[in-house]
Image (spheres, helix red, strand yellow):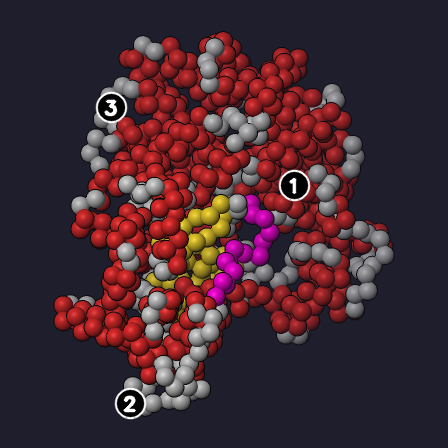
Amino acid sequence: MAPAVRGRVGNLPLELTSFVGRRREVTETRRLLSVSRLVTLTGIGGVGKTRLALRVAADSSRVFEDGVWLVELGELQEDVLLPAMVAAALGLREQSADHGLDSLAEYLADRRLLLVLDNCEHVLDAAAALADALMRRCPELRILATSREPLGIGGEASLRVPPLSVPDQDRRSPPRGLPRCDAVTLFAERACAVVPDFGLTEDNQVAVAGICQRLDGLPLPIELAAVRLRAMSAEQILDRLNDRYRLLTGGSRGAPSRQQTLRLCIDWSHELCTERERMLWGRMSVFAGGFELDAAEGICAGDLTPDDLLDVVAALVDRSILIREEAGAVVRYRLLETLREYGREKLQESGEYASMRRRHRDWYKQLASRAEAEWISSGQVEWIARLGREQPNLREAMEFCLTEPGEAEAGLRIANALYLFWLSRGLLGEGRHWLDLALDRQAGQPTAELVRALYAASMLAGNQGDIAAGASLLERAREVAEALDDASLRAIVTHGVGQLAIFSGDLRLAVACFEEVLDTFRADKNPLRRIATLLGLALACGLLGDAPRAVACQEEALAITESRGESAYRAYSLCTLGLALWQSDPRRATGLFEQGLRLSRAVDDLLGSAICVEALAWIAASDRRTRRAAVLLGAAQSLWRAVGSHGVVVPTLLGYHEESERQVRTALGERAFDAAVGQGTSLSFDDGVAYALDEQPQAAEPTAGAAPSLTRRERQVADLVAQGLTNKAIAEQLVIAARTVEGHVEHVLAKLGFTSRAQIAAWVVERTQVDGQPP
């Protein structure tokens, strides 16, 4: 695995509201992180564990040179997907057949990084096992977790997050003294956001203090209460809380008081909603991870017109029931998990829960089917982005199909529609997971969906190098297709045999299979299988040395994709044509690879990008641009790892790679070669692509010219960095503080215009070669 992200500083969200109080907790958490490799913040829901963790993580970001990364586990339902979710948060793609935890541990093994695991309580055993395994194998890794209870493993330090401080009930404070209580400060700041002229006065201070006291200083209910100032005074809010508090306390003595208080706040917020708002709140609880307006219209509207629905959604946003978030050019909405659970209870009480889950499943099945039908079109980029945003809901729809009797066939349909998405985004492990579950639940009745699912599962297995599993799945698919006596299904199976033949290196069998089905797919109205067959045939013919046939197939595929404005397969067409021509016409091939790389970047396709960058390295090596070739080989290596591959696996292409690497290594020498490759592997996805396209030549390739004005100590530090020493090791050798070393490294990076230690190492090596001595 390797970074597939746009930058390497982390993924923490920006704070949209002020952070109030918690000075002691922030200080203590940072202290615990300095002495313990796992720190867990515990406490009840709504107490502010996540917000505290994010503030500590942001404050600690400078300490972790490989970034601070947030993994939100609130929507995770399948324990086995936890490593994949962590990998996705890190910006990785998992395509290897190896266990996800092993790949993740390998990636994190030598990185100084803080991982924030948020909301672990519902996957506590899996989170504990993951944390324990990673800490044993990744010595520089730190984990900051939030959970309603500790993970319970060795080496863990836990900190209970208390409520915010509240005014003393027995003492009346002057208005200027109240803000010193964090709960009051929080209420006042959130109140000003909704009523700009709000201020603490002699008239309202008792009511504000009472609100904070009655809510036990819990941030979530305090914020919800402050929103009510749009319609009520502080005194009225306190009166409602007093009434509801007494009623709730009398009804549930067994629950902890703070849970009663949080429940009170949600109950009360529900009462303040109109009937339509309550109805929509309950119905929207079927969504997982967020939703867009069209989904709400299709699933939740009922008798509401689109305009009425929009009004109710806006009202729920105003009431802080729904959270509005911008995702590119679209707006998404989500319920906090606590509010979602509450809404689900109300939906179950109404008797609508089962029907709404089915409507949710049906709508998302249609969404996935539309994406599949429109995949070869100018809307492909938007579909990839939309399906990416909707993954929690698609998983929820799949879960419904797998748990409800008689719904397995619908589950196969959804999985088949998502196959192209999983393939394009490198989510092969997740795709196989859902397909395996759906195939296990299917009653064994021979259907077209069953054949398609077996084919999809076999292709995902083949892309992971699991040829035996892929062949077994195709054999089952062949049996079902024969039982149905369907020629089109038999063609799909034959196409799959051809694809597996490429993965296993039997190129002549691949050509025979693709030729057998090409006319069938040419007659099919859906261009997808025709394009896939042409690309497979072109690759096999090109590797067998039949360049004219390969070019003809590529040009036919390009004609289809270009006319429809498609991106992903067009990129593969350009790349495969380049592979057929790069030795005979390297100039033309370079242009093809660069076009393909731009298209792959547009759809965030790491596999296509890896092939293009790799091939551009071969061309640079053949042109004797050896240092550029080495950097490109490093960038390609990073991309191969990101998609779970050890590198080029097709035998002929592997030969090109090995020959190019040998040429470059001989020309540069071992040390310079390793430094240049290291520079390439340190590049982020965007920077690596930009380097390959010559979009950032000055920043990406350090010069061996005149040395910048480094001080003597900075030159010493740079030379030790080039030797691979950590800051701690450099500090020990130079007998200075590690913090001082960190400052010197930052100064060197700034003066040289670099962003990574690998670039410093490459610069030192080049200056040594030019000047004969270290810089």
Residue 475 percent location from the top left of the image: 35, 19
How would you rate the neighbour count of disc 2 (Cα within 10 Å): few for under 14, some for 14-19, many for 20 or more?
few
Between disc 1 and disc 2, whose residue precedes?
2
Q: Which of marks 1 and 2 is in front?
A: 2
**Residue 262 is drawn in which quadrant?**
bottom left
Q: Between marks 3 and 2, how big is the CA–CA gap?
A: 71 Å
The residue that label 2 is drawn on is 170
Which residue is at 60% across, 29% downward? 571
Between disc 3 and disc 1, whose residue precedes?
3
In this rendering, the answer to whether 445 lies above or below 654 is: above
The residue that label 1 is drawn on is 689
The kind of residue on which mark 2 rests is Asp
Residue 720 percent location from the top left of the image: 70, 62
Residue 512 percent location from the top left of the image: 50, 11
* Mark linked to residue 273: none
The kind of residue on which mark 1 rests is Val
The magenta stretch is: 1-17
How would you rate the neighbour count of disc 1 (Cα within 10 Å): few for under 14, some for 14-19, many for 20 or more?
many
Residue 428 percent location from the top left of the image: 44, 36
Note whether residue 236 is visible: yes
In this rendering, the answer to whether 689 lies above or below 567 is: below
Q: What element carries label 2?
A: loop
Which residue is at 68% across, 64% downward? 745
Q: What element carries label 1?
A: helix
The kind of residue on which mark 3 rests is Gly
**Residue 223 is drawn in which quadrant?**
bottom left
Between disc 3 and disc 2, whose residue precedes?
2
Which residue is at 60% across, 23% downward? 562
Which secondary structure class fits the magenta region best?
loop
Whether the residues at callouts 1 and 2 have beta carbons within 8 Å, the answer is no
Which residue is at 25% across, 61% downward? 271
